[in-house]
Image (tube, grey):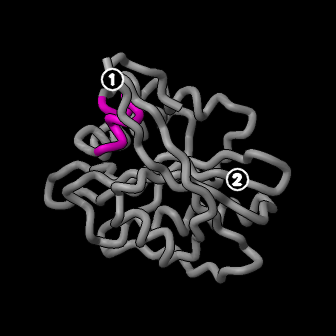
Amino acid sequence: MGLTYYRRFRMEFDFGRSSLPEPLLPAGYDWTPWRNASIERHAFVKYDSFRDEVDAVVFRCLGNYDGCQRLMSEISEQNSFLPSSTWLVTRRGHEGTEPVDCGTIQGLKQRRRVGSVQNVGVVPTHRGLGLGRALVVKSLHGFREAGLRQVYLEVTAENEPAIELYKSIGFRLTRTMYKAVDAQPAACY
């Protein structure tokens, strides 16, 4: 069993340095705020968003539904959980079709004035429409309303589209880290 090291970036958004646009969704999509009963919905979107991505290798729980459900339960049970920064994006149903959840984001208050974005995920068939940008901006509004001054997130360096998205919103790269991954299943953190 060998280890593989994945490069990860910590990126930070400072409300004092960056302006915050309004979170805009394309026509036909709606915001669904956090509810305790929506853990399974968030878990499914998280699984559908990450299961075929490098993050499911780096964090194995993202590669299976049970792991995503466990992760969502753990996030939402933390004292630092911030419902105002936790959202689903839902595609409206039309002509006899059911609405479909297609984007998720969660937020935590890490320290007195600092928050962290957790697991920005958009289902592949809904990518390229601006949903990721809208989710991050919507979550940032929730952090700001909670009185936080700074927000950070971590992203795998191979995920160049996400890095470019975060930079375009106003996040700055502040640290490079390496995560060791072995062949054995590992905890998701």
Residue 126: horizontal and vertical position, in percent?
Answer: 25, 60
Residue 149: horizontal and vertical position, in percent?
Answer: 78, 65
- What is the span of residues highlighted in magenta in the rendered image? 54-63
Which residue is rendered at x = 32% and y = 35% of the image?
57
In this rendering, position of residue 47 left or right of residue 134: left
Which residue is rendered at x = 67% and y = 60% of the image?
151
Q: Quadrant of the N terminus?
A: top left
Q: Nearer the viewer, residue 82 or 9?
A: 9
Give the CA distance from mark 1 to mark 2. Answer: 34 Å
* Residue 61 makes an appearance in the image: no
Residue wearing tag 2: 115
Query: Which quadrant would residue 133 be assigned to in this image?
Result: bottom left
Residue wearing tag 1: 2
**Magenta-drawn stretch contains 134:** no
Q: Nearer the viewer, residue 107 or 87?
A: 107
Question: Under tag 1, what secondary structure?
Answer: loop
Which residue is rendered at x = 30% and y = 69% of the image?
28
The three-letter amino acid code for the residue at tag 2 is Gly
Question: Under tag 2, what secondary structure?
Answer: strand
Q: Considering only vertical position in the picture, is 153 above or below 145?
A: above
Q: Considering only vertical position in the picture, is 118 above or below 26?
A: above
The three-letter amino acid code for the residue at tag 1 is Gly
**Magenta-drawn stretch contains 60:** yes
Residue 113: horizontal and vertical position, in percent?
Answer: 82, 56
Q: Considering only vertical position in the picture, is 19 above or below 78?
A: below
In this rendering, position of residue 111 left or right of residue 87: right
Residue 170: horizontal and vertical position, in percent?
Answer: 58, 76
Q: Residue furthest right?
A: 112
